[in-house]
Amino acid sequence: MALRTYQQYLESLQAMRPNIYKFDRLIEDVTTDPATRRTVRGHGWTYKHYDDEKYGDLLVTKSHLTGEPISRYLSLIESAEDMWQNSRMKRAAFQMTGTCTGGRCVGWTALNAMFITTYDIDKEMGTNYHGRLLDWLKQAQERDITVAGALTDAKGDRTKTPSQQEDADSFLHIVERRNDGIVVRGAKLMICGIAAANEIFVLPGSGYKEPDADYAVSFVIPRDAEGLTIVETRHPSDTRDEEDGFDNPVADGGITQSFLLFEDVFIPNERVFMAGEYKHSLSAVLNFIGPYRSAIGGCVAGQGDVKIGAAVLTARANGLSAKVFQDKITQMTINNETTFGMGIAAAAMGRKHPSGGWQCDTVLSNVNKVHVATLPYQTNILAQDIAGGIAETGCMPSYKDFTSKKYGHLIQKYMKAKASAESRARAARLVEWATIGAGVPGCMHGGGSPDGAKLVIRAASNLEDKVAHAKRLANITEDIQEPVKKK
Ligand SMILES: Cc1cc2nc3c(=O)[nH]c(=O)nc-3n(C[C@H](O)[C@H](O)[C@H](O)COP(=O)(O)OP(=O)(O)OC[C@H]3O[C@@H](n4cnc5c(N)ncnc54)[C@H](O)[C@@H]3O)c2cc1C
């Protein structure tokens, strides 16, 4: 089996040990539970459209290992074109589901990061991690599983390294090394799409030095591994009634994040891809953020497409032409295409790593992260501006009131504008969803903070090259040194 059907995907999730909780309640079936079913449906969109005329080429590619058709989410990114397809697929996924499919994309990026990193570790240290990764990848492709990705540790005091923390478990770490594997303890927080995932790919969250060698750990585990407890986080829709017809405008999407609590979890050797090689932990992270920060421009562009469409629909329902808001809509389009195009540029300016993987341009992908943490918020402001007060939280009656036998007809009478009250309400709710609610995942911190990206930009921006150009053009021969900071 290389490509699963949607039904097979659902069955694979149902067959897993229930280990996900929310509101102190065990979720027995993630495919039907109100807390998780929509994230499953959102991720399931990809399984439903493998044969689709429009999306099939984006969703399916050829395995570099077997030559068989596989999900793109389990492929090796080998070229700039593979990266463009990554951005295009994420944009399409957002347009179709209204939200993020991070339970597939973060794991995909993680496995690509470790494809390159394990090659480098093996070359330097004579280990056999790369072969293990390929063995795992081959069977993951054959089973067509959904793989989430987990980097973010609990972190404790942000000014301290892992081994300096009061609580050694603030960062996920190895607590025991056995002949047949390792045992890990700690947590990974805010991880996307876990309820929709079959497996979780774990990476170090930062670069480490020798005292923190036990924190330099990477592996992949089944989502229901023994010793792993998962807690779904709060969500904007939690405060609303699940029965409320307007509160679930996007039937086939809704991302969730989770806390992963590892209490002495055993990982067999064949699933371990880094276990103490601290010198390579930073490159694992850098190999992750390159493609991630490039392609996230596609996600937020797809999200922005939905915001534009929803805002224009609301305006039209109000009786106003899109032309009235032309400048605002143009600005929203500029914002979308800036992040999308920047991601494509980061891919195009990348280079081939000796392992065969593709590395995006460091400066461009990190510049994109900063745009992603800025422009979608401006787009939100414009969408809400266009849509009017009913798109802001708390300004529209609930669906139950809207359909009340007692006064529903009055609410509908006064909510009617150019279009029917119901269409107007649905369009406005989609604006609210896309700009305030579940439709705004990860622009600021997903894939790391913008300040972290600025650190990388500063380190990689070749300031002295620019100074040398200016010096030559200005015909300056004097040696003008950077002033030494007074102690
Ligand atoms: C919607 C969403 C989805 C996510 N999905 C995933 C996922 O699927 N997988 C995953 O691994 N992670 C995921 N994350 C987590 C994300 O990677 C982190 O939120 C991000 O790396 C920032 O870490 P933090 O939240 O702990 O913030 P913090 O590290 O607490 O940062 C907060 C602020 O403090 C600054 N700061 C932090 N440390 C220092 C310091 N020492 N000195 C100066 N300034 C500092 C940061 O730059 C930032 O401005 C997700 C996050 C979100 C919001």
Image (cartoon, grey):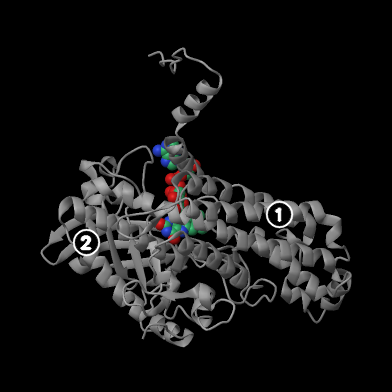
Q: Position of residue 220 (x, y in %)?
A: 30, 66
Which residue was labeled with disc 2? 129
**Relative to 14, is 241 above or below?**
above
Q: Does the residue at mark 2 contact the one at mark 1 (Cβ under 8 Å)?
A: no
Q: Position of residue 83 (x, y in %)?
A: 47, 61
**Tag 1: Cα neighbours inside 10 Å, few (<14), some, or many (≥20)?**
many
**Tag 2: Cα neighbours inside 10 Å, few (<14), some, or many (≥20)?**
many
Which residue was labeled with disc 1? 332
Residue 17 seen by the camera: no
Is residue 367 found left or right of 115 in the rendered image? right
Specify whether tag 2 is near ligand 1 (CB below 8 Å): no
Residue occupying image coordinates x 43% and y 38%: 460
Residue in the foreground of this view, choosing between 248 and 405: 248
Residue in the foreground of this view, choosing between 370 and 465: 465
Name the amino acid type tagged 2.
Answer: Tyr
Quadrant where the C terminus lies? top left
Residue 222 seen by the camera: yes
Find residue 305 and name its label.
none
Quadrant where the N terminus lies? bottom left
Name the amino acid type tagged 1.
Answer: Met
Q: Position of residue 227 (x, y in %)?
A: 27, 68
Secondary element at tag 1: helix
